[in-house]
Image (tube, helix red, strand yellow):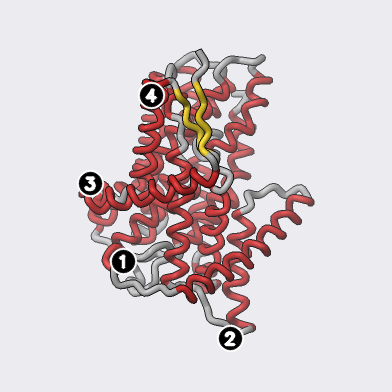
Amino acid sequence: MTPEVFEVHAFVSVTVAFLVYIMGAKLTRNVAFLRDFNIPEPVSGGLLVAVATMLTFLFFDVAISFDLAARDYFLLVFFTGIGLNARISDLVKGGLPLAILLGLTIIYVILQNIIGVAGARLFSLPPEFSVLLSSAALIGGHGTVIAWTPRIEEMTGGAAGVSELGVAVATIGLVCAALIGGPIAKYLINRWRLEPDRPDEEPTVGVSFEDEATESINHLSFMRVMLWVHVTIAVGYSLWETLDHYGIGLPPFVPCLLAGIVLGNLVPAILPRVVEVRRTPTLAMISDFSLGTFLAMSLMSLQLWTLQGMGLVLLVVMTAQTALSIVFAIYVLFPAMGRGYRAAVLAAGFGGVTLGATPTAIANMTAVTKRYGPSPMAFVILPLVSAFFVDIVNSFAIQFFLPL
């Protein structure tokens, strides 16, 4: 029997996301485990709603589907804010760490696909399914796995369950990514007694838990930041359309991030009387709000009931993939990035990228920095690698491992 589908309008979906975020914030502040292990606020609330919709499906045979048309706007606002916050001087200093992180990411993509190949052989699945158990679904996320599904179906002669398996792996990966980043950072920071290099720096995203009650933001500063953000998005979107016209396919938020970096540094230099928005509490708050809303919408809309019937494969493969992500972040990435506080923050973000998506990684780092202190460079380095280079690396990896 086909379940009844209950469509939630886009406006209502955003409204629910606000409620989910507030629920998550309350939970994080009142449940010691969530705060101590730096679980992002929208994750706590979003997973509760996802479980509730799954129970609705199981007991009432009703599939709740949220319209996510407005979600991408919040993603653009968030990454534009990250770009506006960046200083060119920091980017120059970050050249070597960025190169190291890119190299580590390439190594990781190979290791992740090796686990996928092993998983496909262990469960006697078609060899082409290996990428569904690895980088196509995990580092690539839902968008990448959906894009590759027709090719895999063609190569396997129309094998059943291609789309379902890929989406299931991406879904579980997103949940795991949101849960492991905070504990990774907590372990490293406590183990090595780490502190921020520049503790007085304004946070890149959000404000610290201790400063929430005293932070002053007024309507003028809010409107000023939103003006900067919208102008920058317009520039970034024009750049995205130009690149797309010439066959250079990038997610729209990448040109917006780059436009933010350019405008955030160029305008103050040529127009010194213009009030800056870089490193202001208002920009940090708007970035936090946008990321939280995007992530809340992503997690609350997870259709967990689609995972039925794939239990053993998912349990074994995702346990191995999650273990690889944790071990690699702690014992490879953290030492390679210098064993400092920034390395610990990046390790939390790397857990988000390798199993989920860039926004999940940033949410992990935000939860960590709100608790322990700022790390501005991490918020520039990681998105440039995960959003700008990873798709290119992943596309080559998928094509290499697909026929194995």
Query: Which of 193/357 is in front?
Result: 357
Which residue sits furthest right?
246
SS label for mark 2: loop
Q: Is residue 141 above or below residue 128?
A: below
Q: Is residue 274 left or right of residue 189?
A: right
Q: Secondary structure at mark 4?
A: helix
Q: CA distance from mark 1 to mark 3?
A: 20 Å
- Identify which residue is drawn at 44% across, 58% down: 289
Q: Badge 3 is on which residue?
A: 33
Check disc 3 and report its element: helix, strand or loop.
helix
Q: Amino acid at mark 3?
A: Phe
Q: Quadrant of the C terminus?
A: top right
Q: Residue 113: in sight, yes or no?
A: no
Q: Decide: few, some or many residues near mark 3? Use Cα within 10 Å; few <14, some 14-19, many ≥20.
A: few
What kind of residue is marked 2? Pro
Whole-angstrom CA distance, mark 1 to mark 4, is: 42 Å
For the residues labelled 2 and 3, say whether their Cβ atoms are less than 8 Å apart.
no
Amino acid type at circle 1 is: Glu
Mark 1 or mark 4: which comes first in sequence? 1
Comparing 226 with 183, the one in front is 226
In front of the other: label 1 or label 3? 1
Q: Which residue is mark 4?
A: 316
Within 10 angstroms of label 1, few (less than 14), some, or many (20 or more) residues?
Answer: few
Residue at mark 1:
212
Q: Position of residue 333 (x, y in %)?
A: 41, 50
| Mark 2 or mark 3: whose residue is earlier in sequence | 3
